[in-house]
Image (spheres, grey):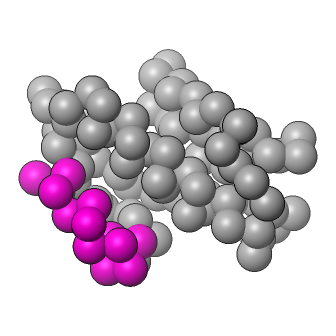
Amino acid sequence: MNFADIELINNEAIHNFELFVNGHRAFIDYKKKDNKIYLIHTEVPAELKGMGVAEALVEKAFNYIEEHQLKLVPLCSYVQLFLKRHPEWGRLVA
């Protein structure tokens, strides 16, 4: 599935990065303090499992973090795994 055309939503009111895919909401829960953003938990509904949604969501969130010159604190186990698979993103880690 191609996620390039799906916009990442920064829902600041509830501290979530969100992707809506096929009518379902996937999200990363975060907290922001100063120039650091703490990615706490990634959740993808069962209907979207195995489609690459979590990976697309994390990559879009990383792009957002980089564009806004923030530093990443990866508390979420999936985000930590993503960083191991994609060490080039290590430049964002605080």
Q: Is residue 80 magenta?
A: no
Q: Report the residue that reaches farthest toward the top.
A: 13
Give the residue displayed 40% in from the left and 65% down from the top.
Answer: 79
Looking at the image, residue 85 sits to the left or right of residue 42; the answer is left
27 displayed left or right of 73: right
Q: Position of residue 90 (x, y in %)?
A: 20, 64
Task: Name which quarter of the figure residue 2 lies in.
Answer: bottom right
Q: Main secondary structure of the magenta part?
A: helix
Q: Position of 27 compared to 74: left or right?
A: right
Whether 88 is drawn above or below 33: the answer is below
Residue in view at x 58 percent, y 56 percent: 56
Q: In the rendering, at what x and y percent does residue 46 appear?
A: 81, 67
Residue 4 in the image: above or below residue 58? above
Picture layout, residue 77 above or below residue 18? below
Q: Which one is nearer the viewer's eye here, 19 or 40?
A: 19
Residue at image x 28%, y 47%?
A: 38
Residue 76: quadrant of the picture:
bottom left
Q: Quadrant of the N terminus?
A: bottom right
